[in-house]
Image: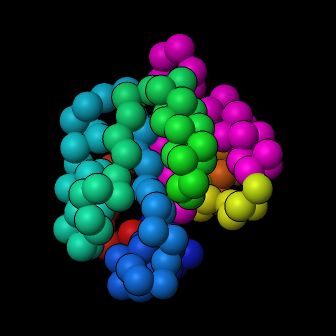
């Protein structure tokens, strides 16, 4: 992943006292194994487990994000799969951005879309829906 993602991670991990007391990172993938891999990667960077929200689908993730906002929290970083049943990653990203636009805090999350496809059309579509970055699976910790 990019420096932008790393900077957001740094904000949460290294500047804990100055960062938002209720800042969160979301991981979304319909395959539990992929969630575990991403979770391990993020935790290995020193992120407090209590700052991580792991969801197996877009719908659940939107509900969790809404809960976070309603309780005064902010989502700083989102790592989301694109191919998911019920609500795919594209739809999730679009709805997340819409939800975010009504957020008084007005702090946009960094969204990194992660896809099993290597073709640029999948990346471009994710960016068009509101993602900041798009990556092919598997994502390595060195790219973060
Ligand atoms: Mg998937």
The answer to which image quadrant residue 57 occupies is top left
Magenta stretch, residue numbers: 75-103
- Identify the residue shown where x is 54% and y is 47%: 71
Residue 122 shows in this picture: no
- Identify the residue shown where x is 79% and y is 45%: 102
In the image, 96 versus 2, the foreground residue is 96
Where residue 67 appears, as percent x and y from the top left, is: 53, 38
Residue 64 shows in this picture: yes
- Identify the residue shown where x is 25% and y is 57%: 49
**Which quadrant is the N terminus positioned in?**
bottom left
**Which quadrant is the C terminus positioned in?**
bottom left
Where residue 137 appears, as percent x and y from the top left, is: 38, 47
Q: Residue furthest front?
A: 71
- Identify the residue shown where x is 29% and y is 56%: 50
Where residue 110 appears, as percent x and y from the top left, is: 59, 61
| Residue 27 counted in the magenta span | no
In the image, 33 versus 140, the foreground residue is 33
């Amino acid at each position: 992943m990019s420096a932008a993602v790393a900077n957001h991670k740094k904000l949460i991990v290294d500047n804990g006292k100055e960062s938002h007391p209720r800042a969160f990172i979301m991981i979304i993938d319909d395959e539990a194994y992929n969630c575990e891999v991403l979770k391990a990667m993020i935790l290995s960077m020193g992120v407090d487990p209590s700052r991580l929200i792991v969801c197996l689908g877009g719908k659940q993730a939107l509900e969790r994000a809404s809960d976070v906002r309603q309780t005064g929290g902010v989502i700083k970083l989102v790592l989301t799969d694109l191919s998911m049943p019920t609500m795919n990653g594209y739809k999730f990203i679009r709805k997340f951005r819409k939800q975010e636009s009504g957020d008084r805090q007005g702090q946009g999350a960094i969204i990194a879309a992660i896809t099993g496809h290597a073709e640029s059309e999948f990346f471009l579509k994710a960016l068009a829906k509101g993602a900041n970055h798009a990556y092919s699976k598997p994502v390595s910790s060195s790219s973060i």
